């Protein structure tokens, strides 16, 4: 009975629905994109309508919002934050800088393509993305979760070596605890 | 224990907000319209765009690439490339919009672009959003342009002041003006496409802008040894396609060239600045017939490449049409002498007063040289074909100009009619004004149909030349001494061409007038005179409508004969002749050096 | 424009520090150039006697061509509303200076930054070390001989897919058969000018 | 011994009902908060989905046995508390495990969860959690005093330590203890504010200060358990206060009305107030609430 | 007995810090005994990037230096370049600039209100004030085309003229925000608990304030009346009538009240600007940006941002690119040396509260 395919499927649907309806975002303003998070979360755009709310620590969070560029110094902390998060977890890349460097394409201190270092589920275009765009990003993520396609964490687990290599390339002094699954 | 009762209770007044309707924008259910100026995704009007790449240059994020798009070819005034924005770089500052010379690039109200594929952020405006035109928000039209659309005005002599002498009308830019004017250039290089010589225009303009005039001169001399001439009299096709000209006045490319080349005011100085690399003699010898612009150009570059070059010139001065055909107020004599002087320093040999066919035969030249370049120009004027044309006082414009330029006396009296609408006609008219005559131009078609440069036409009008369009001369009336007395002409109306060609003038019957004149100057065109070429050779040379047919290296159907200048192109201006000369160099080089191998 | 108080300050400075080159740049701005060893006494003089109590800014400029670093101090007098810009040049090969954090505690932060970004050693400041960067092992990045474009290109992954980009000038030249000589190329003001 | 099946049923479904009510109250609170904040807020079921999601998360946090046990302590404490609180007056199903002296027992069992958490958090090694726990315990010391005073006053006044007896005594509207012993109610309700942990007494979680405090190392299922426990505990406390001061409830509708009204006191206070510092919070409880508590006792003793 | 010291890392991932930075605290019990600011998490090397960009290309990137209030950056760069070039700015542009700067100040104060009360646990306030801030952002969007990054003030004037009827909409928004002020007062500034939290916390000693380089509202919160807008009036501030509020105490409360009153002053300034705004040109064009050479020279310009003196030191060597642009963020001093000093002795509960009251904005510290 328990192993019944249909039962599993129903559990999956319920789980995915719950995951989609309750997205807790770790409160980490990594870049200047953080400035459009308050309007998104507060009364004018009210992202809580979608069950999106902030969470103070990575342990409790589902979504890591990379709000723009990441300096190498921040990247180190972001990786740590990401690895502290519990599965299933999602990453949203926010703004041009996460895609191809944005306006910091020639800066010596920022990474240019986020997906080389962390598995990104959704990219949102803009510099800054407006609150509407941010919400669209979340809606896209919800769709992916509902369809069971937002499996960035899975990808990370499978390709950990590759990610580690890329991460070590830019983080010179790699003093980090091992990833505990 | 003091209790701040107000402080404890007043916060609770906030609870009354609970009954107010929330002001939340319930996106995506409700959509708030973005502002009229919102800076969203790009849109590019692909037809308007000329692919100048200014957007790509200004972008501090290197977000814009110029790429080839299906259906757009490189052609005159269009590089054939179109911008593509990397939205992973863009910051929507819209500098690209404000800098766009054509105004084709703009931003739209769309901004949502969400995907899980990081490689999907390359955005070709206009291709990826063909409907973007309806959503345009941030345009360059609304603000002030970033580029300078106003040309630095060229100082000129006052119209009535000019006619008193043959002094150069255009005074030229001073240093500050030149820097400012050069700074207007966006450096796209679209101009080089249409320039027959493909001069390195953006480069020398940039050099001028940076105050490096010598570098500019060196760049100009790289493929045009008559840069100064061009700086004064070029027909400057480049300016018609200038990116800035789409919405403003084009960069004064000609005047800037003039400014730069004039900085080197003698042949020695040119040599010092240009200091070209001269290859050691390679033992080959080339003969050039005619010391016009094409011949001189070819001779100069052939000399630099180690060829032994001799020019055979029928007249006593070099330059051909630029020497004799262009009035001195546009191109002073000294200027040509300076430029030719420099070429002679570089090893070009010119035999003056050596008319081929008269002083030396074509076959002799053939014997002496391995290759021959013919650049004789159109020297034989067309006749009006009306009665009285052979009367005294009826002159051909190019003869008239030649006489004036070689300071031989010409008597045209005080009332002149010029027939024709080309540059030669205008030149003749303006020269006549300087000789003290009242001048009327009779032209078959409308003023806007005149092939002459509008600047020239305006200049003529400033100087008091009367232009009488749609007038067809019928007869030149003479007095008893067979001297021109008057000209009879009829007014014409324009008949549209049923085949879609340009409208043709048709004489209005009976609408005939007579003007009293002391001279009639005909300027309705010229042709070439190939009589010096032996018939057996001439037979082999393919011609078409009076011009010699050449390949892209100016080679005629007889391999060792090259042709350049007016006799080989339809443009009939100095810069095309120079271009021909430059190309002929490559042809000759190929012919002779390949043979060696 | 009334430059009375600026000139008054200039006079006072010249009387005390004879070697100082004083220039009144404009209303409310005085520029003083001084030998580097005179800077600490001068700053203390400006603070204690000339009422320049607010250290607004402390900057460093790299004059690579002269092989010098220029330290620039901006002091503001709230009493007279005048800014004193004090400048001094120090050797670029072995850049050293003394700390002025005893005069203004916030100078410590500026010195930490200048140390990190230019490699200037401030004697007496014990907090020099990592401030903004982390594990930096290249040239101090704000030095003009450090090429950030090159560094970024070498160290970071840039997304492929844009290789089909063409240069407008080159495309036209190629199409028309124009050969741009090498000496002219540096005058093409396209982006690869560097 | 004869098994009262109805009682067993009650024991089985009381936690479920408590959970559902608690979660729904949580959802409603979020909507009410949102409305006051000029926005719409999440759907009522939001808290439910939050908990379901938390349970569906994988959890890979290893800090030690105590850490695993902490949420279990919390939920045990909540459910135990719930079992000793009569939910519906004179109902066989929902009378639960009331006995003579259960009031005193409740006073103890209610802090049990917090202590369990304290042990667990101590092992997590997160300084924020440790600070949060010490804050929580300090504050507990603060509000326990007025609360105990209020309960003592009532126990003295009504000469019983059994909740069911208390409920039985308040069979009439004007017999409600809120009117009979207003000072005790004041003291208790102020302590209740502290117990519920809404602003200004949310020093324990305080995201901006200690990154949500004790639960900061707990994610996924642990947090789900804690949230469940919180929902049940909220219901238990509300019912307890209703039983003590508002005469309990004869049916579910009354229960919901009474508990919800009571619940709104800390919620609405929380919406419009910032947080105290810990020592301010303790000082607050030791000021007026304690005074009220002492007054209540004094009046009774006199 | 000396209590055991623990080390607490406040940030960089922490809801209490005002941006991506870290404060390393040594704590004995509840009291901070040592604080160390760690920055650099947002270092993008703007100053380096500007050295490899042409003058015009610098202008879109400077606004990223301070995100909550980007306009003083644009203003400073524009004014510095204008000073070196000797370029005149049309009168209308000056008025528009003042309007933009004051709107940005208001937006920033609203954001600060949210942060200040949010760090104290009053979560309704951010919902209100940040929500209301959006109306100002709407105005910016209409005027400049962008909500957050305006890229509007540039050398020679402003980028676009005011849209039709814009003044009326500004006035309407101002009226709305003014009508909201009593609500804010009731909820936050009159709130007994808020006052209890704020009074006597994070005190800056008045006699040290000037020497320590304190500027802006923290300085005025010490009762010292200095403001760049009156010390060195720029644009048209000398033609406008406004009060520079000061408050005694030097604590969080004083700074809060200073900002609260500045909000009202900004409303009044914008109303005056709209009343006095002349017609005419709004932009004195700079040359073609591809060939724009700024003559050699240097300038230090400053603007009163919401956090205090915001300075730019710009050096040109007469080329197409700047030689050096050095940014003095107001938080540079507040966020590092001042914060490290006044956190000592504070309760850990107040750390975030004090940081918010100083307006510590890491991107302008490390740039």
Image (tube, coloured by chain):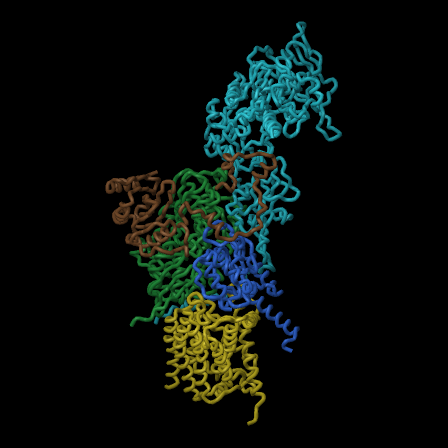
Classify residue A90 as left or right of residue C144. Answer: right
Taking depth in this image into account, of A21 and B315 the one nearest to the observer is B315
Tell me if I can see residue D201 in this picture. Answer: no
Tell me if I can see residue B275 in this picture. Answer: yes
- Look at 49% across and 66% down and name the residue there: A179
Q: Among the chains, which one is yellow?
A: D
Image location of residue D279, percent across then percent down: 37, 71
Furthest residue in direction left, as rendered? C16
Taking depth in this image into account, of E248 and B374 the one nearest to the observer is B374
Classify residue B226 as left or right of residue E183. Answer: right
Image location of residue D50, percent across then percent down: 55, 70
Furthest residue in direction bottom, as rendered? D1
Residue E2 image-quadrant placement: bottom left
Image location of residue D88, percent across then percent down: 54, 83
- Quarter holding the C terminus of chain B is top right
Furthest residue in direction front, as rendered? B597
Image location of residue D198, percent across then percent down: 46, 71
Classify residue C16 as left or right of residue C135. Answer: left
Q: Is residue B588 above or below residue D279?
A: above
Q: Is residue D187 above or below residue E43?
A: below
Taking depth in this image into account, of B247 and E288 the one nearest to the observer is E288
Taking depth in this image into account, of D14 and D298 the one nearest to the observer is D14
Q: Among the chains, which one is brown?
A: C
Chain B, hue in figure: cyan
Q: Among the chains, which one is blue?
A: A
Chain E, hue in figure: green
- Quarter holding the N terminus of chain B is bottom left
Residue E212 image-quadrant placement: bottom left
């Amino acid at each position: 009975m328990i192993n019944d395919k249909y039962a599993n499927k129903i559990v999956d649907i319920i789980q995915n629905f719950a995951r989609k309806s309750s997205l807790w975002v770790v409160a980490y303003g990594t870049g200047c994109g953080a400035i459009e998070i308050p309007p998104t979360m507060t009364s004018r755009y009210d992202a809580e309508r979608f069950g999106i709310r902030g969470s103070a620590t990575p342990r409790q969070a589902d979504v890591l919002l990379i709000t723009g560029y990441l300096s190498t110094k921040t990247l180190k902390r972001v990786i740590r934050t990401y690895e502290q998060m519990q599965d299933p977890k999602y990453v949203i890349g926010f703004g041009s800088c996460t895609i191809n460097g944005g306006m910091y394409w020639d800066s010596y201190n920022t990474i240019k393509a986020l997906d080389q270092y962390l598995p990104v589920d959704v990219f949102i275009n803009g510099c800054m993305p407006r609150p509407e765009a941010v919400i669209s990003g979340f809606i896209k993520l919800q769709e992916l979760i509902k369809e069971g396609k937002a499996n960035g964490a899975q990808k990370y687990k499978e390709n950990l070596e590759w990610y580690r290599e890329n991460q070590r390339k830019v983080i010179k002094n790699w003093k980090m605890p091992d990833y505990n699954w | 224990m003091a209790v701040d009762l107000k402080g404890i209770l007043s916060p609770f007044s906030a609870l009354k907000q609970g009954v107010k309707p929330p002001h939340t924008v319930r996106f995506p259910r409700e959509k708030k319209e973005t502002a009229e100026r919102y800076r969203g995704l790009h849109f590019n009007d692909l037809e308007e765009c000329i692919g100048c790449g200014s957007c790509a240059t200004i972008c501090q994020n290197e977000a814009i690439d110029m790429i080839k798009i299906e259906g757009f070819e490189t052609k005159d005034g269009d590089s054939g490339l179109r911008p593509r924005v990397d939205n992973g770089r863009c910051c929507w500052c819209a500098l690209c919009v404000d800098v766009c010379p054509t105004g084709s690039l703009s931003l739209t109200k769309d901004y949502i672009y969400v995907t899980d594929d990081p490689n999907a952020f390359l955005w070709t405006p206009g291709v990826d959003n063909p409907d973007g035109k309806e959503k345009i928000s941030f345009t360059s039209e609304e603000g002030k342009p970033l580029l300078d659309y106003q040309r630095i005005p060229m100082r000129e002599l006052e119209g009535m002041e000019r006619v008193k002498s043959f002094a150069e009308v255009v005074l030229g830019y001073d240093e500050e003006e030149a820097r400012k004017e050069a700074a207007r250039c966006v450096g796209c290089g679209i101009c080089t496409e249409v320039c027959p010589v493909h001069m390195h225009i953006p480069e020398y303009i940039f050099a001028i802008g940076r105050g490096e005039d010598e570098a500019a001169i060196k760049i100009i001399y790289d493929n045009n040894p008559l840069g100064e001439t061009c700086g004064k009299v070029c027909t400057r096709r480049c300016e018609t396609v200038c990116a800035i000209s789409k919405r403003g006045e084009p960069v004064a490319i000609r005047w800037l060239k003039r400014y730069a080349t004039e900085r080197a005011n003698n042949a020695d100085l040119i040599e010092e600045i240009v200091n070209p690399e001269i290859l050691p003699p390679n033992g080959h010898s080339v003969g050039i017939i005619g010391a016009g612009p094409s011949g001189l150009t070819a001779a100069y570059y052939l000399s630099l490449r180690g060829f032994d070059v001799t020019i055979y010139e029928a007249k006593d001065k070099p330059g051909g049409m630029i020497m004799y055909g262009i009035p001195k107020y546009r191109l002073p004599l000294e200027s040509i002498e300076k430029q030719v002087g420099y070429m002679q320093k570089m090893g070009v040999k010119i035999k003056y007063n050596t008319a081929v066919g008269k002083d030396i035969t074509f076959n002799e030249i053939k014997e002496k040289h391995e290759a021959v370049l013919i650049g004789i120009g159109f020297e034989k004027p067309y006749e009006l074909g009306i009665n009285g044309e052979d009367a005294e006082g009826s002159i051909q414009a190019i003869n008239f100009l030649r006489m004036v330029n070689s300071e031989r006396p010409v008597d045209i009296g005080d009332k002149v009619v010029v027939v024709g609408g080309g540059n030669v006609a205008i030149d003749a008219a303006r020269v006549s004004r300087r000789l003290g005559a009242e001048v009327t131009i009779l032209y078959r078609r409308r003023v806007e149909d005149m092939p002459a440069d509008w600047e020239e036409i305006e200049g003529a009008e400033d100087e008091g030349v009367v232009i009488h369009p749609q007038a067809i001369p019928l007869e030149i009336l003479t007095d008893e001494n067979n001297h021109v007395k008057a000209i009879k002409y009829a007014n014409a109306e324009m008949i549209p061409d049923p085949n879609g060609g340009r409208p043709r003038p048709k004489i209005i019957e009976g609408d005939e007038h007579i003007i009293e004149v002391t001279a009639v100057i005909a300027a309705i065109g010229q042709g070439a005179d190939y009589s010096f070429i032996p018939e057996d050779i001439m037979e082999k040379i393919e011609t078409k409508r009076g011009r010699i047919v050449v390949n892209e290296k100016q080679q005629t159907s007889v391999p060792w004969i090259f042709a350049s200048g007016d006799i080989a192109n339809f443009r009939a201006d100095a810069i095309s002749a120079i271009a021909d000369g430059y190309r002929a160099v490559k042809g000759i080089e190929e012919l002779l050096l390949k043979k060696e191998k | 424009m009334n430059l009375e108080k600026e000139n008054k300050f200039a006079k006072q400075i010249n009387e005390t520090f004879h070697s100082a080159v004083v220039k009144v740049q404009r209303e409310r701005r005085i520029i003083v150039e001084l030998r580097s060893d005179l800077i600490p006494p001068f700053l203390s003089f400006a603070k204690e006697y000339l009422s320049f109590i607010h250290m607004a800014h402390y900057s460093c400029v790299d004059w690579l061509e002269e092989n010098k670093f220029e330290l620039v101090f901006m002091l503001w007098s709230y009493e007279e509303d005048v800014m004193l810009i004090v400048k001094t040049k120090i050797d670029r090969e072995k850049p050293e200076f003394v700390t002025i954090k005893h005069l203004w505690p916030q100078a410590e932060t500026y010195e930490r930054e200048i140390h990190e970004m230019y490699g200037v050693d401030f004697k007496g400041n014990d907090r020099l070390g990592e401030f903004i960067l982390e594990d930096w092992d290249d040239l101090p990045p704000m030095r003009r001989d450090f090429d950030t474009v090159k560094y970024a290109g070498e160290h970071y992954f840039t997304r492929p897919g844009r290789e089909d980009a063409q240069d407008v000038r080159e495309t036209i030249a190629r199409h028309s058969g124009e050969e741009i000589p090498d000496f002219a190329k540096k005058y093409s003001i396209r982006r690869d000018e560097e | 011994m004869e098994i009262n099946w109805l009682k067993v049923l009650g024991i089985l479904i009381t936690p479920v009902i408590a959970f559902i009510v608690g979660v729904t109250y949580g959802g409603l609170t979020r909507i009410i908060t949102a409305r006051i904040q000029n926005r719409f807020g999440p759907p009522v079921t939001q808290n439910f989905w939050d908990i379901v999601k938390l349970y569906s998360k994988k959890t890979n946090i290893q800090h030690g046995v105590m850490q695993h046990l902490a949420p279990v302590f919390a939920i045990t404490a909540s459910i135990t508390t719930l079992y000793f609180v009569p939910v519906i007056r004179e109902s066989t199903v929902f009378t639960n495990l009331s006995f003579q002296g259960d009031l005193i027992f409740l006073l103890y069992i209610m802090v049990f969860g917090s202590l369990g958490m304290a042990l667990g958090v101590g092992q997590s090694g997160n300084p924020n959690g440790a600070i949060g726990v010490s804050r929580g315990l300090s504050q507990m010391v603060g509000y326990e005093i007025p609360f105990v005073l209020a309960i003592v006053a009532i126990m003295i006044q009504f000469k019983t330590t059994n909740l069911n007896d208390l409920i039985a005594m308040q069979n009439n509207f004007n017999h409600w203890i809120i009117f009979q012993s207003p000072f005790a109610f004041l003291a208790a309700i102020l302590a209740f504010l502290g117990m519920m942990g809404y602003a200004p007494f949310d020093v324990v979680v305080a995201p901006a200060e200690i990154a949500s405090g004790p639960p900061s190392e707990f994610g996924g299922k642990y947090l789900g358990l804690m949230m469940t426990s919180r929902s049940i505990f909220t219901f238990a406390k509300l019912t307890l206060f209703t039983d003590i001061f508002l005469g309990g409830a004869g049916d579910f509708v009354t229960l919901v009305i009474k508990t919800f009204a009571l619940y709104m006191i800390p919620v609405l206070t929380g919406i419009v107030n910032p947080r105290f510092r810990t020592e301010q919070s303790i000082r607050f409880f030791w000021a007026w609430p304690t005074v009220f508590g002492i007054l209540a006792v004094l009046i009774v003793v006199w | 007995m000396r209590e055991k010291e623990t080390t607490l890392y406040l940030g960089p991932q922490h809801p209490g810090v005002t941006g991506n930075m870290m404060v390393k605290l040594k704590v004995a019990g509840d009291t901070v005994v040592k604080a160390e600011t760690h920055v650099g998490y947002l270092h993008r090397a703007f100053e380096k990037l500007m050295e490899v960009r042409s003058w015009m290309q610098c202008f879109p990137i400077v606004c990223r230096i301070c995100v909550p209030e980007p306009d003083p950056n644009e203003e400073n760069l524009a004014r510095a370049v204008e000073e070196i070039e000797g370029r005149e700015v049309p009168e209308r542009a000056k008025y528009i600039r003042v309007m933009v700067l004051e709107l940005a100040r208001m937006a920033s104060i609203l954001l600060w209100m949210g942060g200040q009360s949010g760090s104290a646990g009053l979560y309704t306030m951010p919902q209100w004030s940040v929500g209301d801030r959006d109306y100002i952002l709407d105005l910016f969007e209409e005027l400049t085309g962008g909500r957050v990054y305006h890229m509007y003030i540039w050398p020679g004037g402003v980028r676009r003229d005011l849209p039709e009827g814009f003044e009326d909409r500004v006035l309407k928004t101002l009226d709305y925000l003014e009508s909201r002020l009593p609500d804010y007062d009731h909820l936050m500034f009159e709130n007994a608990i808020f006052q209890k939290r704020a009074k006597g916390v994070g005190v800056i000693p008045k006699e040290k304030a000037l020497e320590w380089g304190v500027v802006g509202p923290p300085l005025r919160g010490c009762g010292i009346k200095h403001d760049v807008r009156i010390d060195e009036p720029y644009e048209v501030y000398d033609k406008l009538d406004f009060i520079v509020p000061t408050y005694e105490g030097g604590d969080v409360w004083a700074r809060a009240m200073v900002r609260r009153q500045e909000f009202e002053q900004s409303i009044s300034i914008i109303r005056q600007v709209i009343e006095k705004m002349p017609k005419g040109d709004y932009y004195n064009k700079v040359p073609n940006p591809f060939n724009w050479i700024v003559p050699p020279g240097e300038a230090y310009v400053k603007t009163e941002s919401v956090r205090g003196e915001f300075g730019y030191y710009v050096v040109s060597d007469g080329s197409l690119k700047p030689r050096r642009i050095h940014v003095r963020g107001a938080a540079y001093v507040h966020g590092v040396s001042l914060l490290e000093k006044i956190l000592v002795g504070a309760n850990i509960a107040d750390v975030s509260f004090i940081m918010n009251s100083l307006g510590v904005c890491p991107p302008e510290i490390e740039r």
